[in-house]
Image (cartoon, rainbow, N blue to C red):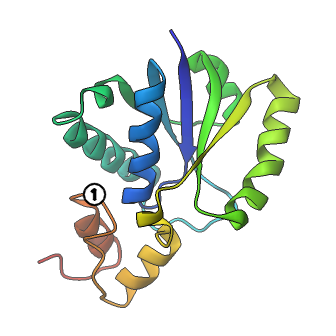
Amino acid sequence: MTTVVCPGSFDPITLGHLDVVRRAATMFDEVVVGVAKNPGKSGLLDLETRAELVRAAVYTLAQTEPAMSRVRVAVVPGLLVDFCREAGAVAVVKGLRGGGDFDAEQPMALMNRHLSGVETIFLPGDQRYAHVASSLVKDIARHGGPVDDLVPPGVTAALRSALGQPTG
């Protein structure tokens, strides 16, 4: 069985993230979505809330897309390479929206390979989501703007709650 890990902070998960996971699920036997704390980012949603939102999004999509039933979600407790080893993953799958994402991801991919031999597979993001980034979603939500068409169901309410805004 071929297992891969799709890691990220998913603060919050977006439709772009979900598209990469969905596409990875059509190519590999098992996809483990690794929800990680990124020390370089200030998180809005706590780690367990993020993991639950990802689980809910995966579950919802699995109702119509059978490949999604081979996706599981787990929290990454430390180094990604250790998580990959424990999951039995042969590779890391990352989505790229553009050249800036590649510039940020390449050093991490090379370090992960250096530390453990695990390779990274880059999937070009769907152009429908090229402008969607978690940081932009949070900025829009902070100012009361609409984000429902950028995130899976339930995420907007979680963002509004974390921001102390009305959820209705």
Seen at 63% across and 33% down, the residue is 92
Q: Looking at the image, which residue sits at the far front?
A: 127
Residue 67 on image: x %, y %: 32, 27
Total marks shown come to: 1
Placement of the C terminus among the 4 image quadrants: bottom left
In x, y percent, where is residue 44? 46, 68
| Residue sitting at the far right | 114
Front residue of this view, candidates 167 and 19: 19
- Residue at image position (39%, 84%) is 140
Considering the numbered disc 1 on the image, is that residue within a helix, a strand or a loop? loop
Identify the residue under disc 1: 152
Q: Is residue 61 above or below residue 118?
A: below
Seen at 46% across and 69% down, the residue is 132
Q: Up-down: is 37 above or below 129? A: above
The image quadrant that residue 87 belongs to is top right
Position of residue 157 in the picture relative to residue 5 (left or right)? left
Taking the image as drawn, is residue 36 in sight? yes
- Residue 167: where, in percent of width, then height? 17, 76
Q: Could you classify mark 1 by the number of other residues whose Cα lies within 10 Å: few (under 14), some (14-19), or many (20 or more)?
A: many
In this view, which residue lies farthest toward the top? 1
Q: Residue at x 35, y 46 (%)?
A: 54
Q: With respect to residue 30, does 55 lie above or below? A: below
**Residue sticking out furthest to the bottom:** 143
Front residue of 59/38: it is 59
Across and down, in percent, residue 104 comes to: 75, 59
Which of the 4 image quadrants contains residue 4? Answer: top right
In this rendering, position of residue 155 left or right of residue 136: left
Q: Is residue 13 visible?
A: no
Amino acid of disc 1: Pro
